[in-house]
Amino acid sequence: MIAWINSVIWEIVDVSGRDPRKAFIALFWIISILILLFLFGPTLHQYLSEIKLDNIKTAFEKLIPIAPAIAILLSALWASVFVLHSAGNSRQTARLQETLNIIVKTEYDNDYISGKKIWHRYRGKDDHHQEFSSLFAVYHLGETEAIDIIREDAQSILTYLNSFEIASLAVNRKILDEKFYMEYNGTNFIRTWNYSVAAIGALRTLHCNPRLFLQWEEIVKKWKEELNVPNIECSKDYSIPDLAEKAKKDSKIIISKKRKGDEKNKTEKKKNKKKNKKKS
């Protein structure tokens, strides 16, 4: 009996999304019903055992003394069902509203928009996997001058990727409505992951933390079947020495490109000044 009650309680907690308030209400009514059964159960059993089909009138008369107890039991059952149902509907409505608020807020957030633009710039390159892993290798292990050059890009992309991890955590914890969010952003969730696996693999190695972006990875694996969008597994082939070597090599390339770009800009400015002087 105790094992059954325990299983029922945990089932209610699980169904209610492990909401402590609804679980407490359910537990309260279960205890109330058990107390009523303890108080009036023997009397009810005695009267029911004396009921004979050939004497219905007498049976009803014998049930009259315990009618209030039966009414209380039924009322408690109906009240518990109603409260749980109402609480579930209220929580679902609140979750949908919160999901919509997060979507709207995210889409108009300046840091998110900036990070998305920079991420798309790297994604548009043919060797985007190389570019993403190189970016974070240089940001963590590169030369100081190279780090200063790519710092803003790295931080903006990291902010953009973190937004997916935060949303995934909220979905997994049932703070956001999974179906609603998946319908709106599910395909983008998986495709962004696919293009970012190189960056995520590098970051996990650089931080010595294989759990980075794990919530996002779990959501991608779960949604890929429902949305019929393939996903790419995160690479585990990165190592600190390899990334350090990559950072050293790519730092020189980044610095060289920056200096050439600065020289080109200076030359163009001089040409523009000469043209303006001739016109004047």
Image (cartoon, grey):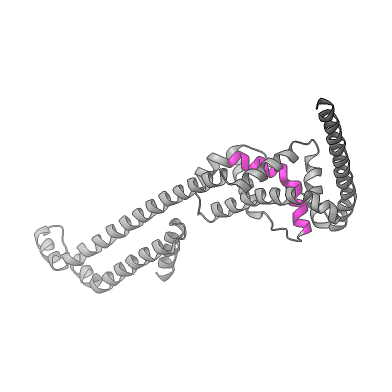
Residue occupying image coordinates x 62% and y 50%: 163
Screen quadrant of the C terminus: top right
Q: Nearer the viewer, residue 143 or 236?
A: 143
> Looking at the magenta stretch, what is its main secondary structure?
helix
Please tell me how many numbered marks the rendered image carries: 0
Residue 151 in the figure: left or right of residue 171: right
Residue occupying image coordinates x 84% and y 28%: 275
Q: Nearer the viewer, residue 125 or 229?
A: 125
Q: Is residue 232 visible?
A: no
Specify whether residue 200 is painted magenta.
Answer: yes
Where residue 194 appears, x then y in whole percent? 70, 42
Where residue 131 appears, x then y in whole percent? 80, 43
Specify whether residue 155 is painted magenta.
Answer: no
Screen quadrant of the N terminus: bottom left
Q: Is residue 260 visible?
A: yes
Judge whether 257 appears above or below 26 on screen: above
Residue 80 in the figure: left or right of residue 185: left
Residue 268 in the figure: left or right of residue 230: right
Residue farthest to the bottom, as pictured: 39
Where residue 209 appears, x then y in whole percent? 73, 60
Where residue 162 appears, x then y in whole percent? 65, 52
Q: Nearer the viewer, residue 232 or 254?
A: 254
Question: What is the span of residues highlighted in magenta in the rendered image?
Answer: 186-206
Residue occupying image coordinates x 85% and y 53%: 145
Judge whether 47 appears above or below 135 on screen: below
